[in-house]
Image (cartoon, grey):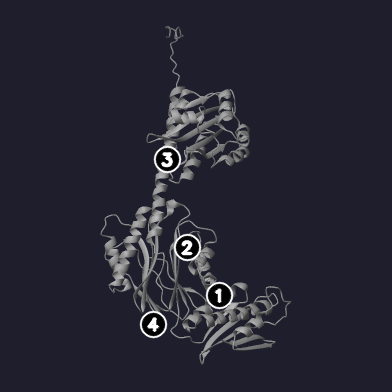
């Protein structure tokens, strides 16, 4: 109040403490952030990691999340310490049950009563001393710091799923009632996130099991086609999707093959995969062309209001004409690897099924040389890396090097070679090697490397199959070629790189073989395992000739 002269004669003021209101607003913002963070993933491991990141250092110097296992044990699922070195020590506890479940104090008590417990310094020490029987585990907790603790039950859908431990290293520290309320709400939201992730992962496990059950475990056999397949589910079950491969006989001279990828993941993708695969089968068995087969499958797919996008290749191997007539619906292009020479991609293209009801799919045809390998695959084989162009080139390189012929599991061997332990999505691979009707003269050029011996033997086995040799002559031929190739690898190039050529032909019921290199023969000291190659060649062949010159060596034989 002012006097007439303007001076202040009395002063009235009010003061409002807004700290509590500000703290409440901050807590509400924090919990809103918690919900956003935990909703960002359904991966169980990521959820647990994010919980610990939210707690430290916001609420504690270090924290621990425990869950109840299927064996009713308390298992340490995640830890986090503000000190990186102590964090490494705590990580030794993850995945283990270190606390006695039937104790009457600490986290077992919190689990039974589903109520939070604030422990002072003495109670915190007692909880570790009574509940952790292993002295090494106790030492880890003691190093982390046992000041005071708050143990909060993690309850979701009426069930206690585990406990959240918030620990401060200062023995004199304490927590306000508001902090406890926020911690309990955090634990509740975290428990819901963990529960949702586990339900989701359970669905993915079901999808993965269903996916494997729906895919063919065996492919049809034919004397002039060698089929090989491989399927590898995604590294994370949450990414298991609808990749498929298939092959079935239409007639004695035709075999249908298909491969595809359903957009999305999980149970719905697996179900859509099976529906698409069966639709292709039924249409192909009715005699429809590959293009009409895809068109009918697309029409059936789009009868549903909510349908996925599906990429696929469906085609027919005409065995007599040695052709592959196919149609593509937005799928990665097939690849062809000739017996000798460079592998190449053939045309793909088209649009995925599920885009347009009246979509048309182009029909293409490619001639397959004798012993050529046709490869179909899903995009996971290439798209695990950001550089798809580089991985596409690596796939062709592997096919040109006939990596698929270094094992009886050709498609699987190729898949492992290309991925080199890197993977994200699920992958399906299907290969078909075409054999000729008669054993014509063939020539195969390979590097003088140990792996080439396996490739040569597999090729000779195919040649013997075409020539309809009996088991004994097949054995002799494979053994003779193996020894001749081993001689070229060991003796021709004195440690330098080089190639050799394998030639096979028939004459008067005999199989004629030659292995030629362009190196200089060198004698080697026989080892206990080697050194008997020529003796084996003489024992398994009807005729053997060894021609050495400055231009190389030719080992010729007849079986």
- Comes first in the chain, label 2 or label 4: 4
Q: CA distance from mark 2 to mark 4?
A: 30 Å
Q: CA distance from mark 3 to mark 1?
A: 52 Å
Question: Is residue 259 positioned above or below 144 on the image?
Answer: below
Crowding at dot 3, Cα within 10 Å, few <14 / some 14-19 / many 20+, comes out as many
Q: Is residue 78 visible?
A: yes
- Comes first in the chain, label 1 or label 2: 2
The picture places residue 63, in percent across and down from the top left corner, at: 54, 34
- Whether pointer 3 and pointer 1 mark residues with C-beta atoms closer than 8 Å, the reply is no
Q: Secondary structure at mark 3?
A: helix
Task: Report which quarter residue 115 is drawn in.
Answer: top left
The disc placed on residue 455 is: 1
The picture places residue 97, in percent across and down from the top left corner, at: 53, 39
Crowding at dot 2, Cα within 10 Å, few <14 / some 14-19 / many 20+, comes out as many
Q: Quadrant of the N terminus?
A: top left
Crowding at dot 4, Cα within 10 Å, few <14 / some 14-19 / many 20+, comes out as few
> Mark 4 = which residue?
321
The picture places residue 552, in percent across and down from the top left corner, at: 66, 85
Name, please, the residue furthest toward the right: 525
- Comes first in the chain, label 2 or label 3: 3
**Residue nearest the viewer, comparing 497 with 68:** 68
Q: Quadrant of the C terminus?
A: bottom right
> Mark 2 = which residue?
381
Q: Is residue 534 left or right of residue 177?
A: right
């Amino acid at each position: 109040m002012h006097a007439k002269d303007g001076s202040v004669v009395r002063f009235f003021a009010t003061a409002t403490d807004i700290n509590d209101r500000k703290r409440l607003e901050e807590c509400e913002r924090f919990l809103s952030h918690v919900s956003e963070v935990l909703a960002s993933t359904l991966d169980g491991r990521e959820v647990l990691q994010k919980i610990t990141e939210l707690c430290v250092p916001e609420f504690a110097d270090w924290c621990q999340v425990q869950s109840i296992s299927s064996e009713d044990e308390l298992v340490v699922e995640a830890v986090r310490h503000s000190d990186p070195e102590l964090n490494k020590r705590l990580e030794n506890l993850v995945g283990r049950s270190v606390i006695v479940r039937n104790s009457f104090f600490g986290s077992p008590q919190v689990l039974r009563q589903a109520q939070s417990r604030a422990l002072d310094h003495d109670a915190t020490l007692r909880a570790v001393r009574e509940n952790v029987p292993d002295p090494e585990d106790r030492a880890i907790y003691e190093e982390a710091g046992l000041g005071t603790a708050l143990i909060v039950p993690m309850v979701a859908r009426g069930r206690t799923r585990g406990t959240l431990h918030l620990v401060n290293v200062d023995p004199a520290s304490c927590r306000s009632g508001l902090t406890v309320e926020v911690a309990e709400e955090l634990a509740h939201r975290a428990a819901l996130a963990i529960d949702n992730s586990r339900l989701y992962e359970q669905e993915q496990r079901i999808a993965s099991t269903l996916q494997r059950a729906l895919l063919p475990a065996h492919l049809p056999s034919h004397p002039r086609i060698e089929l090989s397949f491989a399927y590898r589910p995604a590294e994370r079950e949450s990414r298991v999707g609808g990749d498929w491969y298939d092959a079935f006989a239409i007639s004695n001279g035709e075999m249908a093959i298909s491969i595809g990828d359903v957009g999305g993941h999980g149970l719905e993708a697996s179900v859509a995969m099976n529906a698409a695969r069966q639709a292709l089968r039924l249409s192909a068995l009715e005699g429809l062309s590959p293009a009409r087969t895809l068109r009918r499958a697309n029409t059936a797919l789009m009868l549903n209001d909510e349908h996925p996008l599906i990429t696929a290749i469906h085609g027919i191997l005409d065995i007599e004409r040695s052709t592959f007539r196919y149609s593509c619906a937005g799928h990665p292009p097939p690849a062809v690897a000739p017996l000798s020479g460079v592998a190449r991609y053939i045309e793909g293209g088209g649009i995925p099924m599920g885009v347009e009801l009246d979509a048309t799919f182009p029909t293409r045809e490619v001639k397959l040389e004798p012993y050529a390998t046709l490869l179909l695959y899903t995009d996971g084989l290439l798209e695990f890396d950001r550089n798809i162009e580089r991985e596409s080139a690596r796939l062709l390189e592997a096919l040109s090097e006939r990596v698929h012929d270094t094992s009886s599991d050709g498609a699987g061997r190729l898949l492992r070679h290309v991925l080199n332990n890197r993977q994200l999505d699920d992958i399906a691979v299907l290969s078909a090697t075409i054999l000729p009707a008669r054993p014509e003269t063939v020539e195969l050029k390979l590097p003088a490397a140990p792996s080439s011996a396996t490739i040569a033997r597999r090729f000779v086995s195919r040649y013997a199959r075409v020539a309809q040799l009996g088991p004994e002559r097949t054995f002799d031929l494979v053994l003779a070629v193996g020894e001749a190739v081993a001689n070229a690898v060991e003796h021709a190039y004195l440690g330098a790189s080089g190639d050799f050529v394998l030639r096979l032909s028939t004459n008067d019921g005999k199989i004629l073989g030659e292995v030629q290199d362009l190196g200089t023969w060198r004698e080697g000291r026989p080892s206990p395992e080697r050194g008997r190659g020529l003796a084996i060649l003489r024992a398994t062949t009807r005729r053997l000739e060894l021609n050495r010159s400055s231009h190389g060596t030719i080992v010729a034989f007849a079986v």
